[in-house]
Image (cartoon, rainbow, N blue to C red):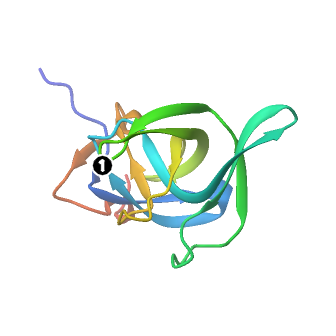
């Protein structure tokens, strides 16, 4: 007997909120081929805060409707080597933040990178998706449907 699947189904594109950055309804590409999730930002700089490693950055691009030229800073969770979409290996700062995704507040690990050449400012990878969601690539923006 097969167990009924209770994982919510998400589409290839979804909306995500970053309450700690006061940003809502960002477009996120769901990418089961990527291990980590990433967030578009620029002016990414390491800083020290009370002797700890932090990173300072500015989210999004000036032409994005949610853009504000406010620098944010977060503790560095890790520095991770990531193979980018063009095959190059980059070292990226990784942070952990709260997000509202599919009706729930969750913690996500994000690498910070310049995604200005990409269509979507957020990429959601397998590390966040595994054991939580099923992805239906023929659908998009299921987060705005009635979540039950």
**Image x and y of residue 35, in percent:** 36, 35
Q: Note whether 115 is above or below 133 in the view shown.
A: below
- Residue at image point 60% right, 46% down: 98
Which residue is more in the foreground, 61 or 145?
61
The x and y percentages for residue 127 are: 40, 33
The residue labelled by disc 1 is 86
Across the whole image, how many numbered discs are drawn on residues? 1
Q: Residue at x 57, y 73 (%)?
A: 66
Q: Position of residue 147 (x, y in %)?
A: 38, 55
Residue pictured at 88% horizontal, 35% vertical:
50
The part of the image, by quadrant, that contains residue 116 is bottom left
Residue 69 horizontal side relative to residue 133, left or right: right
Packing grade of label 1 (10 A; few <14, some 14-19, many >=20) is few
User: Furthest residue to the right?
Assistant: 50
- Residue 89's place in the image compared with 135, above or below, is above
Check the image and name the residue furthest to the top.
1
Q: Position of residue 86 (x, y in %)?
A: 30, 49
Image quarter in which the N terminus is found: top left
Up/down of 41 relative to 36, above or below: below
- Of 11 and 104, the residue lying toward us: 11
| Farthest left residue in view | 1
Location of residue 133 by image quarter: top left
Give the secondary structure at mark 1. Answer: loop
Residue ID at (30%, 42%): 87
């Amino acid at each position: 007997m097969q167990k009924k699947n209770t994982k919510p189904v998400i589409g290839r594109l979804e909306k995500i909120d970053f309450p700690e950055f006061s940003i809502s309804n960002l477009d996120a590409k769901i990418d089961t081929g990527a291990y980590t999730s990433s967030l578009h930002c620029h002016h990414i700089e390491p800083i020290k805060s009370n002797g700890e490693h932090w990173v300072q950055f500015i989210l999004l691009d000036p032409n994005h409707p949610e853009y504000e030229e406010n620098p944010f800073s977060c503790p560095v969770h890790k520095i991770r080597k990531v193979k980018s979409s063009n095959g190059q290996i980059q070292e990226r700062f990784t942070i952990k933040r709260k997000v509202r995704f599919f009706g729930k507040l969750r913690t996500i690990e994000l690498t910070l990178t310049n995604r200005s050449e990409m269509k979507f400012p957020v990429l959601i990878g397998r590390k966040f998706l595994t054991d939580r969601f099923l992805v239906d690539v023929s659908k998009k923006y299921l987060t705005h449907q009635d979540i039950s």
